[in-house]
Image (cartoon, coloured by chain):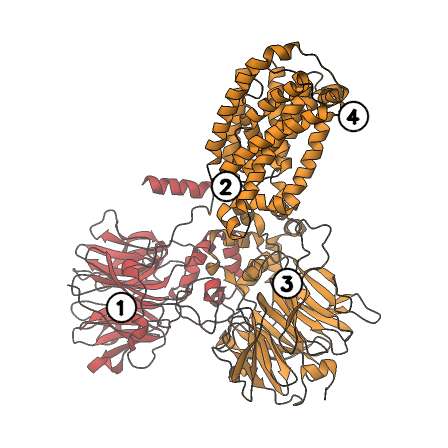
């Protein structure tokens, strides 16, 4: 069978293709926030390159400096627009504010002869004042941003026209100059045009404010959902008010630089700038729906618009035509923005799961008369029930020194059963998440792996404390893997270090099976040292590491790799320290938790049996890919987990015996077992009970706490 | 017409993109427990396959190499009626009391008074190895459905997974001395029912029932896109009919049927009882493919889990509309219904999967 199928499946190339997946990289790339403006960024570079090629003297330092100086003013207006759009509104008055600021700055400087510092302050104050009017109306009076700023636009435009007529002749005759004024208009800061340099500083500060500070997050939150932001306790009115004040001030700053550079009070100043700014912002990837965008994106968009308009003019296109082109670009950008925002998540979802090839050798015999240690029997069906229908999904179970039985449940609790027949049930701790593997430390604290949260501890009094929820980040992984996503099982070495497995870094507890569909090395073995409180990733790239057990002598750690049907031994002491070797391989099923037995061996919970059709599917990554795309999860093929099986191994990794509940009539999906004083206790991820079977040949005094930490009086 | 054309085109251009929606189990198909609740008649009867009502009120059942006669109150008495030379499948009776029986791998035999008589082993030079259904025509001739010329009756899942359409309907003379093919190229015809001058033929792998004029001519559709694999048909005294289904379709199986490479490797390397395939019998064995919805949660398998095996009998009106249904869902055991027979206001059904004869309560239609 193996010969036939491996020849059909093809050789090395096919394996490599599934080992390294470009789709995997793409799916993780698309998931990054900084990839959102990838398309506008590429467009920007493309436009610049194209105009450099078709326009003479375009790609020269002088031209770049000249363009930079002209661009800076538009950049301020674009940032002003971006802030309001991110807040879920719009500021149509930016162009008019720009024009008013230009006129005001000229009047203050030329006619009133104010010192330049005062001119700057007064001009910005005018912008801030107009912004405050907008902000008051929109934030406190809850008027619609579009209409409000449209009205402001019309009123301001008329004002500028009136004032412009009034001041045009005196301004035309004025000729005051000043060194500082010239620096603002045509000066240089570090070889950059002064206005561009200041724009750069504003942009950097603005970017950090928006993306890394509390006010910025509040702004974004309001843009995403005003109602939700209010419920979260954000002072929506005030933040919106300040947003429009900022917007007005930034637009005024643009006008100020324009005045200093051109010294002109032409009546067409700033006309249509709100449209170019809006185009720029949307092109850059700031969503019109609000809540999504950064300053950098607004500037990318502004560069595109500026380069496009400027380039078309240079190539001799009439102004009307370049306006039309701009309009068309805006239309396309809005269309793409809507589609992209709506479908990005879906696109990632479609390509996120990337199955790889898992080729297992033919399974060893498990038939009842097969004569192997795995031979099917019905020994688990004789189990006694504990907590029948009182417990939902006891993934792991453990007993303390007082013979009380603990288990984690799917509600996020740790339950405790006590009394002679375990009939007394109580909620010991409500940790949350999905409590999975458990271990007692030297001081009888219960250490619990909690899926979705990390590694937690519970004191004997029931107090919950966090051990660790992160480890060091891998340098070469796109996804931030520092947080623990699915801590699975733990055990404690004699020095107190907690060794635990993280089954996968790509999926959550509820979608663990997608990791099985994928079959990739997405998991880790991690060690947490309680003395130093340091967490260290010891083994990366393990394939669904599941059960963890410190060997009897405390010198090595055993851990299971579920999808590979293999158990590994990792040496932590002695001459082989740091090395990993195979403990048992090609198991007939999927290994889950692993625990010590009283006779110096190990119990293994075999959560499922390898079914031939699933084994074959693991050799066909493309079939699995199509299966999860075309079928709902309820229809997918799973390993045979409607079965109960526990296997015992000796210290050398040889299987000794097995206990079965074929078909899982009482114990389906067995994920854990614990030997305690002559009984074997059984837990299951999806079960409604805990079971126990008598171990006739076991040491009736042996229990885990004493075995790990010695007897206590 | 245009829809079909477009979907064909789409399937040709992008294989697998055209996922045919399985019909919802709703309306007249709404699931119930009526087959689960049905009382078994007598002891289990492994291998039971088809039913035949005799004029004297007794019922014949084919099971293994035997045909048994059930009689007495509540059909409680069982007696051997005929020993056959092979595994018996379909049964049919002529007006004069002659019984025709299908023998797996060997064709059709005539049984008179419990004695095996004439045999028909081939038609048009082709051996008849997989006879699945029989019907006696008004003129005494016998209509014979052959599921496949490639596979034997017990290999029906292989025939399905090989996507065969090698079945045919043959008409033989009453004494089985001659036979000729009426229509061929059918995808596992598994049921025949005489309807006036036409013959209803259920075509399992195409999930449909067609009406075939005996005088020749084009077949017309009676039922299409059924939720399962239609098997035997039987008449109801009220003018309607009963259609039993081997199993229901699952999205997984439809998917596997589209996945050629995977399917071929599965057929070549895996034990047939562990294939991704429908089954007559619910075993819940851990080596069978397990679907996500069928995972045991808190100790139970949900009844709506994707079923590997299922029990389903449909009641059809005279025009062939589905008017009622009897179910045994994933959590039940009375699966793999191969025959249903209306008798004395009750419905007898053969659950080949569980090896039981079932006595189901059904109401008269107004």
Q: Which residue is mark 3?
A: A503
- Judging by colour alone, the chain drawn in red in this rendered image is B
Image quadrant where residue A684 sits: bottom right
In the image, A97 versus A605, the foreground residue is: A97
B233 left or right of A44 in image: left
- For the residues carrying marks 4 and 3, which lies nearer the camera in this image? 4
Question: Mark 3 or mark 4, which is nearer the start of the sequence?
Answer: 4
Question: Mark 3 or mark 2, which is nearer the start of the sequence?
Answer: 2
Q: Which mark is residue B152?
A: none
Where disc 2 sits, the SS reads helix
Where disc 3 sits, the SS reads loop
Across and down, in percent, residue B155 comes to: 42, 64
The answer for how far apart the CA atoms under marks 4 and 1 are is: 93 Å
- For the residues carrying marks 4 and 1, which lies nearer the camera in this image? 4
Across and down, in percent, residue A405 comes to: 59, 81
Q: Which residue is mark 1?
A: B340
Chain A painted colour: orange
Q: Which mark is residue A140?
A: 2
Q: Which mark is residue A191?
A: 4
The answer for how far apart the CA atoms under marks 1 and 3 are is: 51 Å
- For the residues carrying marks 2 and 4, which lies nearer the camera in this image? 2
The answer for how far apart the CA atoms under marks 4 and 3 are is: 54 Å
Question: From the viewer's perspective, is residue A475 above or below residue B351?
Answer: above
A699 left or right of A639 in image: right
Check whether the beta carbons of the residues at disc 4 and disc 1 lie within 8 A of each other.
no
């Amino acid at each position: 069978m193996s010969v036939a199928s491996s020849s059909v499946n093809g050789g090395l190339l096919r394996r490599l293709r599934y080992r390294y997946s470009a789709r995997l990289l793409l799916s993780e790339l698309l998931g990054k926030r900084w990839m959102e403006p990838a398309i506008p960024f590429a467009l920007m570079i493309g436009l610049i390159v194209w105009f450099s090629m078709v326009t003479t003297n375009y790609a020269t330092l002088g031209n770049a400096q000249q363009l930079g100086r002209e661009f800076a003013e538009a950049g301020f207006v674009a940032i002003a627009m971006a802030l309001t759009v991110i807040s879920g509104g719009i500021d149509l008055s930016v162009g008019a504010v720009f024009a008013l600021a230009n006129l005001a700055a000229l009047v203050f400087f030329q006619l009133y002869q104010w010192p330049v510092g005062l001119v700057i302050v007064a001009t910005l104050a005018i912008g801030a004042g107009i912004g405050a009017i907008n902000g008051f109306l929109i934030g406190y009076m809850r008027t619609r941003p579009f209409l409000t700023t449209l009205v402001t636009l019309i009123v301001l435009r008329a004002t500028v026209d009136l004032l412009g007529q009034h001041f045009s002749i005196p301004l035309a005759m004025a000729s005051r100059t000043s060194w500082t004024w010239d620096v603002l208009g045509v000066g240089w800061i570090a070889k950059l045009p002064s206005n561009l340099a200041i724009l750069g500083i504003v942009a950097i500060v603005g970017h950090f404010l928006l993306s890394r500070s509390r006010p910025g997050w509040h702004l974004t939150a309001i843009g995403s959902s005003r109602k939700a932001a209010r419920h979260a306790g954000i002072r929506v009115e005030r933040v919106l008010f300040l947003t429009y004040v900022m917007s007005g001030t930034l637009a005024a700053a643009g006008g100020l630089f324009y005045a200093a550079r051109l010294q002109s009070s032409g009546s067409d100043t700033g006309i249509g700038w709100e449209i170019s700014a809006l185009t720029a912002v949307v092109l850059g990837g700031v969503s019109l729906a609000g809540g999504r965008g950064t300053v950098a994106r607004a500037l990318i968009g502004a560069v595109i618009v500026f380069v496009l308009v400027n380039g078309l003019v240079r190539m001799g296109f009439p102004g009307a035509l370049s306006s039309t082109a701009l309009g068309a670009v805006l239309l396309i950008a809005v269309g793409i923005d809507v589609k992209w925002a709506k479908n990005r998540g879906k696109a990632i979802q479609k390509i996120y799961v990337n199955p790889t090839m898992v080729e297992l050798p033919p399974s060893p015999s498990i038939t009842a008369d097969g004569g192997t240690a795995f031979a099917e029997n019905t020994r688990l069906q004789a189990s006694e029930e504990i907590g029948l229908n009182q417990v939902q999904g006891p993934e792991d179970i453990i007993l303390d020194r007082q013979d009380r039985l603990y288990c984690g449940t799917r509600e996020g609790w740790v339950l405790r059963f006590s009394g002679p027949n375990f009939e007394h049930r109580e909620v010991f701790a409500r940790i949350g998440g999905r409590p999975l593997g458990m271990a007692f430390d030297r001081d009888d604290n219960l250490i619990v792996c909690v899926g979705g949260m990390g590694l937690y501890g519970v004191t004997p009094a029931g107090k919950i404390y966090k051990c660790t929820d992160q480890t060091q980040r891998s340098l070469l992984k796109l996804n931030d893997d520092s947080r623990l996503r699915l801590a699975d099982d733990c055990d404690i070495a004699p020095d107190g270090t907690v060794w635990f497995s993280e089954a996968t870094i790509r999926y959550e507890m509820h979608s663990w099976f997608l990791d099985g569909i994928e079959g990739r090395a997405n998991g880790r073995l991690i060690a947490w040292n309680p003395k130093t409180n340091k967490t260290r990733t010891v083994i990366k790239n393990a394939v669904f590491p599941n059960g963890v057990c410190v060997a009897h002598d405390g010198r090595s750690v055993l851990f299971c790799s579920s999808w590979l049907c293999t158990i590994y031994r990792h040496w932590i002491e002695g001459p082989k320290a740091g090395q990993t070797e195979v403990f048992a391989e090609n198991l007939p099923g999927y290994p889950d938790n692993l625990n010590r037995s009283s006779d110096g061996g190990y119990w293994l919970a075999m959560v499922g049996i390898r079914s031939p059709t699933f084994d074959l599917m693991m050799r066909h990554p493309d079939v699995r890919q199509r299966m999860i795309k075309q079928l709902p999860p309820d229809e997918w093929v799973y390993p045979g987990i409607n079965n109960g099986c526990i296997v015992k191994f000796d210290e050398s990794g040889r299987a000794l015996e097995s206990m079965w509940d074929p078909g899982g009539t009482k114990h389906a999906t067995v994920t854990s077992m614990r030997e305690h004083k002559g009984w074997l206790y059984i837990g299951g991820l999806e079960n409604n009970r805990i079971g126990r079977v008598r171990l006739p040949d076991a040491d009736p005094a042996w229990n885990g706490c004493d075995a790990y930490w010695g007897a206590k009086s | 017409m245009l829809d079909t054309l477009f979907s064909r085109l789409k399937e040709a251009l992008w294989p697998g993109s055209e996922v045919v929606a399985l019909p919802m189990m709703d309306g007249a198909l709404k699931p119930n427990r009526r087959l689960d609740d049905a009382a078994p008649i007598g002891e289990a009867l492994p291998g039971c396959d088809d039913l035949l009502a005799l004029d004297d009120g007794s019922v014949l059942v084919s099971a293994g190499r035997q045909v048994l006669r059930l009689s007495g109150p509540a059909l409680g008495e069982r007696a051997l009626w005929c020993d056959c030379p092979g595994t018996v499948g379909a049964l049919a009776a002529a007006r004069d009391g002659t019984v025709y029986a299908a023998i797996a791998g060997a064709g059709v035999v005539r049984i008179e008074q419990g004695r095996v008589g004439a045999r028909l082993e081939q038609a048009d030079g082709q051996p008849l190895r997989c006879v699945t259904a029989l019907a006696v025509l008004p003129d005494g001739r016998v209509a014979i459905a052959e599921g496949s010329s490639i596979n034997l009756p017990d290999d029906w899942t292989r025939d399905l997974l090989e996507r065969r359409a090698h079945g045919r309907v043959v008409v033989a003379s009453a004494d089985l001395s001659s036979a000729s093919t009426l229509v061929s190229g059918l995808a596992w015809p598994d049921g025949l029912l005489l309807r006036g001058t036409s013959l209803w033929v259920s075509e399992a792998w195409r999930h449909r029932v067609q009406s075939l004029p005996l005088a020749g001519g084009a077949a017309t559709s009676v039922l299409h896109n059924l939720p399962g694999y239609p098997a035997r048909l039987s008449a109801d005294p009220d003018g309607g009919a009963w259609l039993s289904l081997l199993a229901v379709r699952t999205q997984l199986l439809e998917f596997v049927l589209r996945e050629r490479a995977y399917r071929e490797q599965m057929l070549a390397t895996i034990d047939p009882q562990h294939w991704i395939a429908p089954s007559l019998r619910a075993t819940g064995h851990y080596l069978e493919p397990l679907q996500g919805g069928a995972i045991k949660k808190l100790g139970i398998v949900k009844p709506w889990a994707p079923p590997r095996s299922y029990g389903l009998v449909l009641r059809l009106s005279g025009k062939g509309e589905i008017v009622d249904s009897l179910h045994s869902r994933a959590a039940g055991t009375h699966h793999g219904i191969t025959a249903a027979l209306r008798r004395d206001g009750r419905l007898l059904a053969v659950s080949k999967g569980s090896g039981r004869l079932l006595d189901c309560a059904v109401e008269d239609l107004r």
